[in-house]
Image (cartoon, coloured by chain):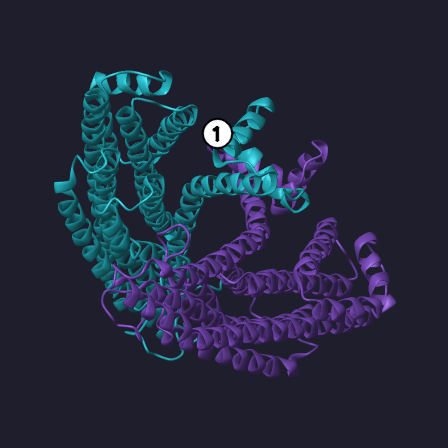
Chain colours: A cyan, B purple
Amino acid sequence: MSRNPAFPPSASDFLLASKRCEITVLQQLLQMGKLVGGVSQLIHVLQRERGTINIYLCSRGALYGEQLAGRMQQVQQAELVVQRQLARLDASAAPLAGASRLFSRIAWALHNLTLLPILRQRVQNLQVNHPETMNTFNEIIRSLLALVFEAADACAEPGMARQLIAMFSFMQGKELAGQERAIGSAGFAAQHFSDDDQRQLLLLIEGQERCFQTFSEFADAGSLGVWQKMLQQQDGEFERLRRVACTQKQFSGGKDISLRWFDITTARIDGMKQVEDRLEDALMASCRASLAAANEALANEIYAPQALAESYAVFVADPLGEGETLTSDGISPRLGRSMMELIQQQSQRLQVLSEELTAARASLRERREIERAKGLLIQHRGLSEEDAYKLLRKMAMNQNKRLIDIAQAMLAVADILPEK
Amino acid sequence: MSRNPAFPPSASDFLLASKRCEITVLQQLLQMGKLVGGVSQLIHVLQRERGTINIYLCSRGALYGEQLAGRMQQVQQAELVVQRQLARLDASAAPLAGASRLFSRIAWALHNLTLLPILRQRVQNLQVNHPETMNTFNEIIRSLLALVFEAADACAEPGMARQLIAMFSFMQGKELAGQERAIGSAGFAAQHFSDDDQRQLLLLIEGQERCFQTFSEFADAGSLGVWQKMLQQQDGEFERLRRVACTQKQFSGGKDISLRWFDITTARIDGMKQVEDRLEDALMASCRASLAAANEALANEIYAPQALAESYAVFVADPLGEGETLTSDGISPRLGRSMMELIQQQSQRLQVLSEELTAARASLRERREIERAKGLLIQHRGLSEEDAYKLLRKMAMNQNKRLIDIAQAMLAVADILPEK
């Protein structure tokens, strides 16, 4: 609009403004895509540090102590990259769609990250409670994932929204794989898996499957191919150890089997990072392509409709002009018709985009609603997260309905649920 | 954020940024509310001009010829106000949420308005087809209403979204009342209502009821009160003339009864404008109140969390600090906890807002989906708009379902519908 300060504003001014807004949105998405890439890397090195600390604490300081400093440095480097990207978000000044929510999530993640320095100091000195330390890492990663969720939810371009949903789902699956590694490492090291450990492992495996299923539905073909190839090449020993961990209570070979499990699951998680990197590349490539296309379209049209509108303005300034310049309905001049077609094209394109976006977002919203229904059960029935999920699933199976239907029904009657 | 260029960015920076974004959104809404008020006025004077032209054409130039110039001037004044508001939209620079779609609608409306000067010239000279002239006015008003719809749809603040939905629904009902006035005036003047006229009148009456029903669900108590009082005081003759128009084919007293109908329906439409003005006042008042509250909250908190965060930063810079400054879980410092609470408050507030907004928007989307299902029937079955609506309604009644359920089912199977 700024290039057309003419008054009164014309239809073509606003048609161009509409196209320029789309470009602004794509530019913001490019920035958002970079941030998501930075967060993906930060989560990866946090998972690595968590894994190393886990072995260090399991072995009461006997193992991996020499790796702690290196892991910390990797996290600090990744943090710095994310901090720079966040500072640039600020510089962009323009309020992104859904920015309040996104910024609120960023605040949460940044706050959680400030817990790390003191925690590390206490880990080094073996002054910590082991499960609480793992929980702190889990919570930090959860808040970073929530940030990615918000970025996907705020994304107004359907192609990129789909890729962000694929990315978010995959990152979530990878995090569950990281938690599976941690419980497995601790159990193998202690040569014992409790009932609770085994229940948690089963839920983590099931959760990964759900996440990778969503990823498969939304990912581009290239990233999906990398993932499928990785699945085919997967070490058979991984599934064997998984089975042992999930079904047996006692076994021998503690320290060795624990480190073997750690190495195999670490290789698996590192492989997942490659899929994530591929997703990130695809995300950025499609964003750059959309941006280039939108810029080119704008450059081509910037004079065309303008020229049309100007000759049209001349035309209507002479309302007594000859009848031949009118179309059959006697009202709309031909040139006005062309303008109308351009506007209708833009309208229809935006309508299609909006519908695609609604479809992509529905999947995200369902995920959120299931989480909220679980939260209600935790709050009102005093259930654990695990039991809440199981109850929802059982209700869905009994009624032959989808999980989301039960979740929505539960949210609809939330007001009348009894307090715990 | 601009006030906190510190690097690395902190949680409190982004908490404040989140609150500032909300304020930006409210400021944009204030501007949008003014635009909607301007459009309401523009539509009102366009309806007036259409009514006057209708009588002028019905009487073949015998009546209201002297009023044409005055009506045109009122429209031009209202157009100028809207143009100024649109120019200010430009100046705000910040891309509004959903701005592409809104700007595309504005382009459509501005383009349609350019059709007026030449149309008026031809009306003056009685060189026009009467129904086509009415259709051009209807189309202009429809594009202005679409703009209001888009403003309501893009609105990210649930309270204002509800009021914009009330406003849009009421404006739509008022426009149907204007179309009812036009058909009635022409029919009474010609001393004849065709089957088609009577069908259209019934649909317009039914449509008004639907619109005012939606308005009643979403309006503030004050505006609703004005509307209900107006309904109670309504002239009994209006319903009598409505009944005559809808049920009788022939009658006497043409010109007089036509002007009587015109006066009564005009008084009714002018009364509706008062309800609209009241809605607009309520909209602006609640937007200003939200903005004032948000600004005050920001002013109060701008130093508080900042101060907290700073003392917290000092604290974590000394990770060997005494144990007493740690909370029971041994990880989160007390001051960090307070920061966490502030972030959680903001998160929860945004979550509640988002849910309210989703509920308010659902009503708008349903309206749009019913329109699109109607469009499908028109396209694929070659039905008129009237018959398409009737068919949808019949299917809904037969299956004991809501209209929206049938519309959504139709959209879901759109791909397999046979071509006309």
> Looking at the image, which residue is at 56% across and 69% down?
B127
Residue closest to the eye, B117 or A159: A159
Is A304 drawn above or below residue B328 in the view shown?
below
Q: Decide if residue B321 is on the left or right side of residue B396.
A: left
Provide the secondary structure element on which disc 1 rests.
helix
Residue closest to the eye, B415 or B359: B359
Which amino acid is tagged 1?
Ile
Residue A284: % across, % down: 22, 48
Residue A147: % across, % down: 35, 51
> Looking at the image, which residue is at 18% across and 36% down?
A274
Q: Decide if residue A159 is on the left or right side of residue A354.
A: left
For disc 1, the marked residue is B416
Count every numbered label the image shows and give the total. Answer: 1
Is A56 drawn above or below residue B42 in the view shown?
above
The C terminus of chain A sits in image quarter: top right
Q: Residues within 10 Å of mark 1 (few under 14, many from 20)?
A: few
Q: Quadrant of residue A410?
A: top right
Is residue B415 in view?
yes
